[in-house]
């Protein structure tokens, strides 16, 4: 099947194109055919080899390598005789061999092979045989080369008429040329001119003017002598007119080229100016973004600094004072025990203990030491655990990917974001379940916070907390995506780009 397909494509291309020496499609097809030939030789498939040799002979004949063409044609004939193949293969091969000799101007050998090919065609199919038409047309061409003009006409003319009946057009140019040359040699200029006209119509239309001039030269041989002067004057007038038209065309072409060049220069200048404006606008926009980010980072740094100050004051100041008060009250109670006041003292001591614990929690949330020592994952896990123990919310913490430390500023910002989102769930969502997830990718940190609460009401604008979160994420060149439906919960997804420096530090 491959052999039939590739050989059919090759046959079509050989018939459709005059010069295929540098045709890329032909080279591709021949590569496939060479592979098939190798496989057939390995298998000893004589039938396939016979067909391949036939098409290879046609290919090499078409590209002008006639020795190679004859080699493959003879190989084909040997296999065709051995396999007793169809007459059309042998006739076609003999025709191809004859064509190679005809192109090499070895007309005697060409005629012999054309006649052998004709002899292979049975009488029963000669009336509709394309190979017979081809063989007779090329045989007539060979006779014409040997200057046997009568034989050339007698052989070519019937073949031409049969080709016209069978609507075979692509070979008739050889017949017209042969007949034109033969009648010209015999002095029948009228018929020679007629056939030369038909030859020029069939042949390349781009060469029409040149071939018509040849026809006119043949016709002039039998025209009346007094027409020569008129024809010469007409030709001179035509040349003069063509010269004027050519000059006008050159002028028009020059003006057009100048206009196009001017337009092109204008377009290039316009595009260059637009490009400069775009670059300038981009620089201004980037500068504004950098200023905004710097402002946000400065504001966040100020907030964190203030948080640290408040945390230290609460822990060291108010926390220490509560501890002293608790110790003093306990000492007074031990020195002056009174049965009626035991319950009150115990209650006061418990309140002081609770206040001290809450104060420590508040100070820890303002500036958690575990974040600075153990990192984002440990601090977030501990925060979620404390929320889960102190509330009815089933808060689950998850982490994925290779856990690694990030710059303190990023970890602190992400921790604050998680705190803010969880506090929002506790205050507003009325949720029973929630998930906090941190995912580490190679160049990205992803945070997801979901709950099954009441969701964000339709048309409700974002509060201060969400706006603050967006600003924090924007300052880290990240983005926030919020998906929420009333009564179906809320999902907040945050992406922050991180990268690793040559020293192995993440930024």
Image (cartoon, grey):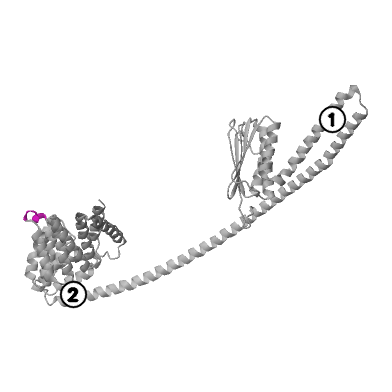
Q: Which mark is residue 90?
A: none
Q: Residue most toward the top?
A: 340
Instruction: Name the residue beneath numbered marker 2.
Output: 231
Residues shaded magenta:
123-128
* Front in this rendered view, residue 47 or 392: 47
Question: Which residue shows up at 67% across the image and 48% down it?
Answer: 410
Quadrant of residue 170 within the rendered picture:
bottom left
Q: Residues within 10 Å of mark 1 (few under 14, many from 20)?
A: some
Can you see residue 468?
A: no
Question: At numbered mark 1, what does the secondary structure look like: helix, strand or loop?
Answer: helix
- Spot occupied by residue 171 in the image (x, y as percentages of width and height): 17, 62
Q: Is residue 261 left or right of residue 478?
A: left
Q: Residues within 10 Å of mark 2 (few under 14, many from 20)?
A: few
* Front in this rendered view, residue 505 or 153: 505
Question: At numbered mark 2, what does the secondary structure look like: helix, strand or loop?
Answer: helix
Q: In the rendered view, would you say 460 is above or below 56?
A: above
- Spot occupied by residue 475 in the image (x, y as percentages of width and height): 65, 49
In 3D space, how far apart are the residues under numbered discs 2 and 1 (Cα atoms)? 134 Å
Instruction: Name the residue beneath numbered marker 1.
Output: 349
Residue 125 included in the magenta stretch of the image: yes
- Spot occupied by residue 71 in the image (x, y as percentages of width and height): 20, 65
């Amino acid at each position: 099947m491959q052999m039939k397909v590739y050989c059919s494509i090759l046959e079509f291309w050989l018939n459709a194109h005059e010069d295929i020496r540098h045709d890329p499609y032909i080279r591709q097809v021949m590569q496939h055919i060479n592979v098939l030939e190798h496989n057939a030789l390995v298998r000893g498939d004589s039938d396939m080899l016979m067909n391949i040799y036939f098409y290879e002979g046609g290919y090499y004949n078409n590209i002008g390598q006639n020795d190679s063409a004859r080699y493959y044609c003879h190989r084909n004939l040997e296999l065709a005789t051995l396999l007793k193949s169809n007459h059309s293969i042998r006739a076609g091969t003999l025709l191809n061999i004859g064509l190679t000799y005809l192109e090499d101007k070895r007309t005697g050998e060409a005629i012999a092979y054309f006649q052998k090919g004709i002899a292979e065609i049975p009488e029963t199919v000669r009336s509709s045989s394309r190979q017979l038409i081809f063989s007779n047309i090329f045989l007539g061409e060979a006779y014409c080369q040997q200057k046997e003009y009568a034989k050339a006409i007698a052989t070519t003319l019937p073949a031409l008429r049969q080709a016209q009946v069978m609507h075979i057009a692509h070979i008739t140019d050889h017949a017209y040329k042969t007949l034109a040359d033969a009648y010209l040699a015999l002095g029948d200029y009228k018929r020679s001119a007629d056939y030369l006209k038909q030859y020029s119509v069939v042949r390349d239309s781009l060469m029409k003017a040149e071939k018509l001039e040849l026809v006119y030269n043949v016709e002039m041989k039998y025209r009346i002598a007094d027409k020569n002067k008129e024809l010469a004057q007409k030709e001179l007038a035509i040349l003069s007119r063509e010269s004027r038209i050519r000059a006008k065309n050159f002028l028009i072409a020059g003006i057009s080229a100048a206009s196009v060049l001017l337009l092109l220069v204008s377009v290039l200048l316009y595009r260059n100016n637009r490009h400069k404006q775009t670059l300038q606008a981009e620089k201004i926009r980037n500068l504004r973004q950098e200023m905004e980010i710097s402002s946000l980072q400065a504001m966040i740094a100020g907030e964190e600094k203030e948080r640290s100050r408040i945390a230290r004051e609460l822990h060291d100041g108010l926390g220490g004072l509560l501890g002293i008060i608790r110790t003093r009250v306990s000492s007074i109670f031990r020195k002056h025990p009174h049965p009626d006041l035991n319950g009150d003292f115990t209650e006061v001591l418990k309140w002081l203990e609770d206040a001290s614990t809450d104060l420590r929690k508040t100070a820890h949330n303002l500036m958690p030491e575990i974040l600075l020592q153990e990192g984002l994952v440990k601090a977030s896990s501990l925060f979620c655990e404390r929320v889960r123990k102190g509330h009815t919310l089933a808060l689950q913490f998850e982490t994925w990917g290779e856990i690694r430390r990030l710059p303190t500023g990023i970890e602190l910002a992400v921790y604050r974001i998680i705190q803010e989102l969880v506090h929002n769930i506790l205050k507003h969502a009325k949720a029973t379940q929630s998930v906090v997830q941190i995912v580490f990718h190679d160049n990205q940190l992803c945070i997801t916070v979901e709950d099954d609460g009441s969701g964000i009401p339709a048309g409700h604008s974002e509060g201060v907390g969400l706006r603050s979160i967006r600003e924090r994420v924007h300052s880290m060149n990240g983005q926030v995506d919020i998906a929420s439906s009333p009564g179906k919960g809320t999902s907040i997804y945050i992406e922050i780009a991180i990268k690793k420096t040559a020293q192995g530090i993440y930024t």
